[in-house]
Image (spheres, grey):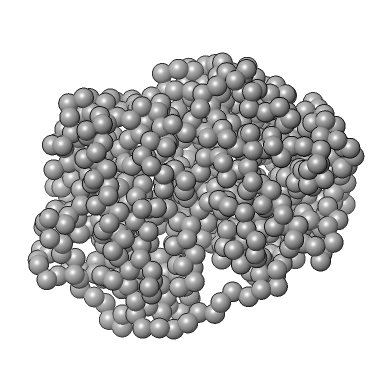
Amino acid sequence: MKYLSKRAVALLALLLCLTVVVGVFGEALPAEETAELFGSPWVNSMVTGNLPETAPEEKDDFYAAVNYDFLAASQAAGMSMPLAASAGEIQAAVMSLLQDESLSGNGIDQLKIFWEQAADMDALRKDSLSRISPYLERIAAATSIQELNEVLTAEDFPFSPYLAMPVAPLALNRENGVWIFPALALTSDYSNGANSYSEPVEDAVTFQQKMSSLERVLYIPVVLSALEVPSGDTAGTILDLFNTEVAYVKEGYSEAKAAASEYGFISSAPQRMTMEELGSQCSSFPLTATLAKFGKDKASAFVVPCPGWLKELDHLWTDENLNRMKLLTQYKVLMEVVPFLSPEPINSLRELNQQQPLDAATNPWFVCNRADTFGHLLAKLYAEKVLGNEVKDQFTSVTQGLIDTYRTLIEETDWLSAESRVKALEKLDHMRLNVLEPDGGYFDFSGLKLTPTSEGGSLLDSYLVIKAYLNEAENAYIGKPAKADLPWKVINPLTTNCFYDPFSNSVNLLPGFVFSWTCPGNASEAQVLGGLGTVIGHEISHAFDYAGSQCDAYGLGNPILTETDREVFLEKVKAVEDYYNGITILPGISCRGTVLRVENTADLAGLKAAAALAKAKGLDMKAFFHEYARIYAMAVPQSVQELLYSIDMHAPAYLRVNVNVQMADEFREAFNIQEGDGMYIKPEDRLMTWGK
């Protein structure tokens, strides 16, 4: 369950990728239309062109009042998203660090080799596809599914086009095992719910709405061209490949599916299997052989969320579908390595989007700041040398304070039975914290050995060496006591994000989320709690929301609520759903209360915990709530708001502020909210899940 910031990243990707997809399909996006102000009970002020001429009173529309100057200044620009600006700020900080010649160690030495190879544009142009072509040719040469299996399972074929196999806890009170997910190339599953797969699509317009990953869309024409797909067949080929992947991954786990499913879906989705049981899932696709090739077969058990996708993949894996699966396999391999090839084809597409071209100055950061290369090393440098121990200690203290406050809220919840209360408190007792670094430390690059270009190495060769090295490093965790930080191993910690993982019962604050917008240098304690503190409170609250309450203290699918308590809790969730369903966000369009119930219930409890802690500390509550509203400041065109409506698992930013603050006693007290004010809500209509 991810925080707002991931939405910002996905949104920027959407804006840029749609231009490319429009070019591929030769269709235009609908033009913006001006209309009178819309939104009820509050004007949707985050939509550009929909801002009142004068600032409203804080008592009537808190979000617009606090952020009015920002929103007014953003009207001419068309879009302003401060959270998305973190990428440039963090890049500048890390780039400055890398100029420090006192940095030493094998990891730094190997980073420099990789960096120099990424900056050698002449070598990249010269190599072009030559180093990846042999792998593509081996796939093309397969004349049967059996021969394709032999290619995929060969020791010298370093790709796993269909399986993602991260090492993660089987349960917090057990050892680490292997989780198995579909490896995605065309579809995508942003953890904030921007899922691009659900059902096959038949037309370009629907497809462009589903494509939400900038990299994927930018590379599609490049990859198809490399596979010698005629330009006239591009649209049809993309849709066919997309629908082929959808045909099996739609049966897998996705957060959108989990959020919209009946209570119990999350607890029952992860299926724990032995190797023998896993083998029974596929008779044609080389599932167990692939696991063995990558050293994942050493696990005592495996977890497959919603394993139906494996059987669907196996159904596709036939000689009748050979050509289709060969093309998809080639596409998946090329999609993985395109960042490590010549950027020239991509630059022509970036130019269309008015993006800076990848060159000797920009390409190194582009390829080094990735989870599958040196992202963990760069994040370690940023966390230690830019943020420092003082910031880490500060937010560790804030997190612990919020956990203690949540303990009080649980104790005060009168509808909770003694049995459920014990399980909820146990979950807090076992909650793992990964603040600015994983508790097991970042990946260690001390044993990595890359070959410089002068000795015959290349960027692609180095990537494949790093890939194998990180795989072995991850495999070393298999069978060891459970580590709650393993979700970090498959993400880039410099991503602007925070998250709670129910399967490891861990709260994770990535260093990429801490920068000047979320953590101003001169912030008071009230502002710290109102800003980043409420983000952390939101993530902690996920342990007890519609989704997280389905898992116990150890990450197993044992709901913490008794059946009777669950009925009461679901009634409270239903009240949240109904309230949001009654809000109009766009002309003729209401908020999607049911789909948003996971994030909305987390928002509600998270702010309540942070506000309670701030009040207990005797802090300036007006400053607290002002910072809460400020951190969500954003302005987007109506068309983008419409896209977010269809993909985002969070309520629009202005509602995440206004709805949640109007439920808080501390807000009503601080701003003297009275009946008749726009932020007033009757006592009987106030929403609450935990506390009193």
Query: In the figure, residue 408 lies in which quadrant?
Result: top left
Numbered marks: total: 0
Residue 254 picture location, percent across and down: 51, 43
- Residue closer to the observer: 300 or 456: 300
Question: Who's the residue at 24% across and 66% down the image?
Answer: 62
Query: In the figure, residue 681 lies in which quadrant?
Result: bottom left
Question: Who's the residue at 32% across and 46% down the image?
Answer: 602
Looking at the image, residue 264 sits to the left or right of residue 88; the answer is: left
- Inspect this view and state whether residue 151 appears: no
- Residue closer to the observer: 677 or 393: 677
- Relative to 435, say whether 339 is above or below: below
- Inspect this view and state whether residue 329 appears: yes
Residue 414 picture location, percent across and down: 13, 36
Residue 217 picture location, percent across and down: 66, 58
> Quadrant location of the N terminus?
top left
- Relative to 239, say whether 472 is above or below: above
> Quadrant location of the C terminus?
top left
Question: Who's the residue at 38% across and 69% down the image?
Answer: 589
Query: In the figure, residue 26 lies in which quadrant?
Result: bottom right
Question: Who's the residue at 34% across and 80% down the image?
Answer: 37
Residue 83 picture location, percent across and down: 44, 58
- Relative to 662, say whether 394 is above or below: above
Looking at the image, residue 629 sits to the left or right of residue 244; the answer is: left
- Residue closer to the observer: 277 or 217: 277
